[in-house]
């Protein structure tokens, strides 16, 4: 390899590489099952709860008899299931695999990570039941009660430490941009989560400072953390799947630095009940996030440009769509922070649409692409229902566009009517109904796509365990039988 | 059964180029930061915890505080009295023998109608008169003729407020007539 | 970047900066506040919610009301209104003064200019500009006052008299500011709708009270039970499809009563230094207690 050093950053092949990709993938199998498998289940549950919530707009008497299924409990349960049940475990699983692969070191003690993942899922279950029971904390995006938050925090740390250990003992010392993003994400969440829980639940601050801290937390979670975890995966998959280098190392560094510099101040809306400097500062920083957005868009476009590979509904399609959704949702966020626009879009469906586009259109789709790429390698088996991946892709695209674009338009319409005091409030709400209907159709499609994802993930896990069991059975019967009979061996080879 | 997945050992990880960040992006960043600073200067209230939008500063909000209750300005009246009238009538209003009669408790001050006490500083007074059973026959010039209506009302209010408190303070409107 | 330690350092500095700005600074600036005096009076504010209203806040939190209702009033500007309260004895002079101040009021005769008092005759930029106008009117023998008039869509809708500020939420945990308005803003609902009966009926069957409302019914906050020796005093009067079967009555559970007490306690109209406002004209209160203490509706209805 004699590529000129000035224009490329190829890994030096002479550096000692102690683990093959296959070994690394195999070591990540248990964590991936525990994290991504559980995430897929929570994703479907969150879609179901979200559907119940949105049907209530079209028929307020739907399931109205039960306190557990009232809108004010089902809606936070669905958003929490989406973020804490799906987004964080999926991001962790993919991030772990990225750190292992890019550091060329297998994950040691994968069983510890799997146990921690199960603990995390237990925390999510306890938290969701708490919300439905009425123990919601009242703080948006932090609704899980204290007793569940402790479990989640401990589980996250138990997953982060092996990740840092793997990174520390890596054999490839040069850092690739994805590693910065993943390491930052592993550091970010424990700090914001512990701060928010300590100052809002354990030893609450007084008055409106609670709202400031809650907005700080939700901004850092939904903007910075999702961007870090999602871009870490995207910046690996885009070059990998197009067989082209990432354009470029320094632009990625610039994007990383400006993302965390500006993005961490995002979150406080312009009309907030706080002294003027807080919403102003947040608004200025939110508009400035156009800079990392621009850099990231440039990286994505330049990396993919000229690539002739047809993505065919595979992981590359998911990641490309995810990047487009990231840019669009970032633009929506930035312009909604401009003072003249926020006057109209504050308190409307526009904010929900922007959040959903980032959560689902960007992060979930990128995680799907990553999972569809990683799982076959981790398990050694292709997806049993490979054709459904393409169906999932189209369901996801259509669903997220049908959910977010009508909601955004409905929000803007609702906002124009809200600032006009001559329009009765009932007309304001009614004007958004048609858009909500389209949004519900989008949610149906998303739910269908999530089911397909769950199907594939469960099928892979089941196949893997069946193969493991068959192999163990074969090994046992081999010992019992005096002569080995090749024709009796299981017909699925699994490398363990 | 699903197909096996072939994991090659020669699979290489992605690489990144070393192209520099375009200069225009840095320029855009700096422009945005500058715009942000200007915007914060205009709307941010400079980190004060008492400034809430739409007000941009504490004085901006103070423009809407209730006006102070209107009425004659006794402080100004006292200042004017001491600079002018007290030379003859003394700062405690007890008068100076041979110069000016007493004001405190004088029936000329305590009387109900304000016209007498308004006319004296405006027009002046001479000839024999009795003040609290004392005979006086001096001449006083119209010391208050040069004052504005507000100032004269302030002095007279001060005199009556200090030494004839059971009467209303003079109103500026009355002294104009 | 060359090493994980450098990544950690950079991430730490970025997050520490926003932590300082949006976690530490709000605590220092806002959490240490205590009750302050209202603007121009010695009333302490806020007084804290009565116990039943505090329990109602827990019900509000547990049922997720914050996902549809906000509790923040936004203000976009402020003006001063000159309001003529009495014409005085010299009607002609008063009418002339009014016409001089605001020629747009028309050149009708004194009677029409002075009809319908108290009446706003002029809007000026601030209290300093109001001074000369007030002097002109007082010189003509009329009585007038300058009132602070916050501007904005929320205020025009009747959702509040002024913007909400930190002092309004000092006594609340958790603070439920809200970020969506699928339902109306509730920051001053205690001023707008003081009637407990309406709130209870609305919670039980929102579509009965507000035609076409999207709010789901909260029937689980109520209990349908057999009428005892006599009907309960707080039984709901529900008509139509949802009325209880004969011999039964609908009674609010403690959660419903607490929630309604909380809603009745929601008001943010005290004049403050950071959000100046003219206090409402003195009302004939039944007790000497300041208006913000009791749950009872005020003697005069809230002026629009």
Image (cartoon, rainbow, N blue to C red):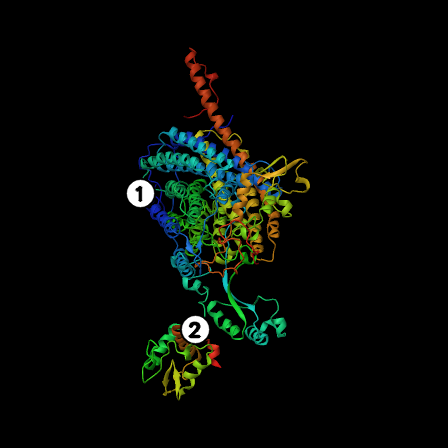
Left or right of A127? Residue C243 is right
Above or below, comparing residue B149 to residue C53 in the picture: below
**What kind of element bears circle 2?**
loop
Give the residue at the far bottom of this rendering: B127
Q: Quadrant of the C terminus of chain C?
A: bottom right
> Residue under circle 2?
B72
Horizontal and vertical percent position of residue C185: 54, 51
Assess disc 2: are there few (<14), some (14-19) or many (≥20) residues with their C-alpha within 10 Å of its C-alpha. Answer: many
> If the image is split into quadrants, where does the N terminus of chain C sit?
top left
Q: Is residue A393 visible?
A: no
Q: CA distance from mark 2 to mark 1?
A: 73 Å
Total marks in image: 2
Residue at 56 percent across and 44 percent down: it is A403
Q: Is disc 1 on the same chain as disc 2?
A: no
Depth check, front residue: C148 or A373: C148
Residue labelled with disc 1? C5
- Which residue is at the front of the view, C86 or A440? C86
Nearest the camera: C19 or C116? Answer: C116
**Viewer-closest of A455 and A470:** A455
- Badge 2 sits on which subunit? B
> For mark 1, does the 10 Å Cα neighbourhood hold few (<14), some (14 to 19), or many (20 or more) residues?
few
Residue B49 at least partly seen: yes
Q: From the image, state whether disc 2 or disc 1 is nearer to you.
A: 2
- Res A28 label: none
- Whole-percent x, y for residue B133 in the image: 38, 81
Contact flag, marks 2 and 1 (Cβ < 8 Å): no
Please say if A257 is above or below A444: below
In the rendered image, residue C191, in percent from the top left (x then y), is placed at 54, 53
The image shows residue C303, relative to residue C1, as above or below, that is: below
User: What is the secondary structure assignment of the residue under circle 1?
Assistant: helix
Given the current orientation, which residue lies at the most extreme top position?
Answer: A482
User: x and y percent of residue A59 in the render?
Assistant: 62, 41
């Amino acid at each position: 390899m004699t590529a000129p050093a000035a224009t490329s950053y190829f890994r030096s092949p002479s550096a000692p590489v102690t683990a093959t990709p296959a070994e690394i993938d195999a070591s990540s199998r248990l964590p991936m099952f525990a994290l991504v498998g559980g995430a897929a289940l929570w994703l479907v549950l969150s879609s179901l709860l979200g559907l119940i919530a949105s049907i209530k707009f079209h028929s307020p008497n739907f399931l109205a008899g039960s306190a557990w299924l009232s809108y004010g409990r089902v809606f936070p349960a669905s958003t929490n299931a989406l973020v804490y049940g799906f987004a964080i475990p999926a991001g962790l699983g993919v991030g772990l695999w990225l750190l292992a692969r890019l550091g060329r070191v297998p994950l040691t003690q994968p069983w510890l990570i799997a146990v921690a993942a199960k603990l995390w899922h237990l925390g999510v279950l306890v938290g969701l039941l708490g919300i439905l029971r009425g123990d919601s904390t009242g703080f948006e995006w932090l609704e899980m009660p204290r007793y569940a938050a402790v479990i989640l925090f401990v589980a996250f740390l138990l997953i982060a430490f092996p990740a840092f250990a793997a990174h520390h003992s890596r054999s490839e010392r040069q850092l690739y941009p994805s590693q910065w993003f993943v390491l930052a994400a592993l550091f970010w969440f424990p700090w914001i989560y512990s701060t928010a829980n300590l100052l809002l639940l354990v030893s609450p601050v007084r008055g409106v400072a609670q709202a400031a801290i809650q907005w700080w937390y939700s901004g850092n979670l939904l903007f910075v953390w999702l961007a870090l975890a999602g871009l870490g995966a995207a910046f690996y998959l885009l070059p990998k799947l197009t067989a082209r280098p990432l354009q470029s190392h320094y632009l990625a560094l610039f994007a990383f630095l400006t993302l965390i510099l500006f993005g961490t101040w995002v979150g406080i809306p312009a009309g907030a009940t706080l002294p003027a400097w807080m919403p102003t500062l947040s608004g200025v920083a939110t508009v400035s996030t156009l800079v990392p957005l621009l850099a990231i868009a440039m990286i994505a476009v330049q990396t993919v440009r000229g690539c002739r590979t047809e993505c065919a509904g595979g992981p590359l399609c998911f990641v490309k769509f995810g990047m487009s959704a990231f840019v669009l949702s970032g633009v929506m966020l930035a312009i909604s922070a401009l003072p003249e626009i926020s006057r109209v879009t504050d308190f409307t469906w526009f904010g929900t649409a922007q959040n959903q586009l980032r959560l689902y259109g960007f992060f979930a789709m990128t995680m799907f692409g990553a999972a569809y790429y990683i799982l076959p390698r981790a398990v050694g088996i292709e997806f049993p229902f490979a054709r459904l991946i393409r169906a999932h892709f189209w369901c996801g695209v259509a669903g997220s566009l049908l959910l977010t674009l009508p909601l955004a338009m409905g929000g803007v319409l609702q906002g124009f009517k809200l600032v006009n005091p001559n329009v009765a409030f009932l007309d304001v709400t009614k004007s958004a109904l048609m858009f909500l209907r389209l949004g519900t159709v989008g949610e149906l499609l998303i739910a269908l796509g999530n089911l397909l994802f769950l199907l594939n993930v469960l099928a892979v896990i089941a196949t893997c365990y069946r193969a493991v069991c068959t192999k163990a059975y074969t090994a046992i019967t081999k010992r019992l039988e005096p002569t080995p009979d090749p024709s009796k061996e299981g017909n699925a080879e699994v490398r363990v | 059964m699903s197909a096996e997945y072939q994991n090659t050992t020669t699979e290489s990880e992605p690489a990144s180029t070393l192209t520099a960040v375009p200069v225009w992006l840095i320029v855009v960043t700096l422009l945005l930061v500058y715009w942000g600073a200007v915007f914060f200067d205009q709307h941010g209230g400079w980190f004060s915890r008492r400034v809430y939008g739409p007000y941009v500063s504490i004085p901006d909000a103070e423009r809407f505080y209730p006006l102070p209750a209107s009425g004659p300005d006794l402080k100004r009246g006292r200042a004017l009295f001491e600079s002018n009238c007290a030379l003859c009538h003394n700062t405690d209003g007890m008068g100076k023998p041979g110069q000016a009669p007493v004001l405190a408790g004088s029936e000329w001050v305590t009387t109900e109608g304000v016209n007498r006490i308004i006319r004296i500083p405006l027009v002046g007074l001479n000839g024999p008169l009795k003040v609290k059973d004392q005979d006086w026959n001096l001449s006083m010039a119209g010391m208050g003729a040069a004052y504005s209506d507000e100032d004269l009302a302030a002095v007279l209010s001060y005199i009556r407020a200090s030494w004839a408190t059971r009467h209303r303070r003079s109103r500026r409107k009355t002294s104009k007539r | 970047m060359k090493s994980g330690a450098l990544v950690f350092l950079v991430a730490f500095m970025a997050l520490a900066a926003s932590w300082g700005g949006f976690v530490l600074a709000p605590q220092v600036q806002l959490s240490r506040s205590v009750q302050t005096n209202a603007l121009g009076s010695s009333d302490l504010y806020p007084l804290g919610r009565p116990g039943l209203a505090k329990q109602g806040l827990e019900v509000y939190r547990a049922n997720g009301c914050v996902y549809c209702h906000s509790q923040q009033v936004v203000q976009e500007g402020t003006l001063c209104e000159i309001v003529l309260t009495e014409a005085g004895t010299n009607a002609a002079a008063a009418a002339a003064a009014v016409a001089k101040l605001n020629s747009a009021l028309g050149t009708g005769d004194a009677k029409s200019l002075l009809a319908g008092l108290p009446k706003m005759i002029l809007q000026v930029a601030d209290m300093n500009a109001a001074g000369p106008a007030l002097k002109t009117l007082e010189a003509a023998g009329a009585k007038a006052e300058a009132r602070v008039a916050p501007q904005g869509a929320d205020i025009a809708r009747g959702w509040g008299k002024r913007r909400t500020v930190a002092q309004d939420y000092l006594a609340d945990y958790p603070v439920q500011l809200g970020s969506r308005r699928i339902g109306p803003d509730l920051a001053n609902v205690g001023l707008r709708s003081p009637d407990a009966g309406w709130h209870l009926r609305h919670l039980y069957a929102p579509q009965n009270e507000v035609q076409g409302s999207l709010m789901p019914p909260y029937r689980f906050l109520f209990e349908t039970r057999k009428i005892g020796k006599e009907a309960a005093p707080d039984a709901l009067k529900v008509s139509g499809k949802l009325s209880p079967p004969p011999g039964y009555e609908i009674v609010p559970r403690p959660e419903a009563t607490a929630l309604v007490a909380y809603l009745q306690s929601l008001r943010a109209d005290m004049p403050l230094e950071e959000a100046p406002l003219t206090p409402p004209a003195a009302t004939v209160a039944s007790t000497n207690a300041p208006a913000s203490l009791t749950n009872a509706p005020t003697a005069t209805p809230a002026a629009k």
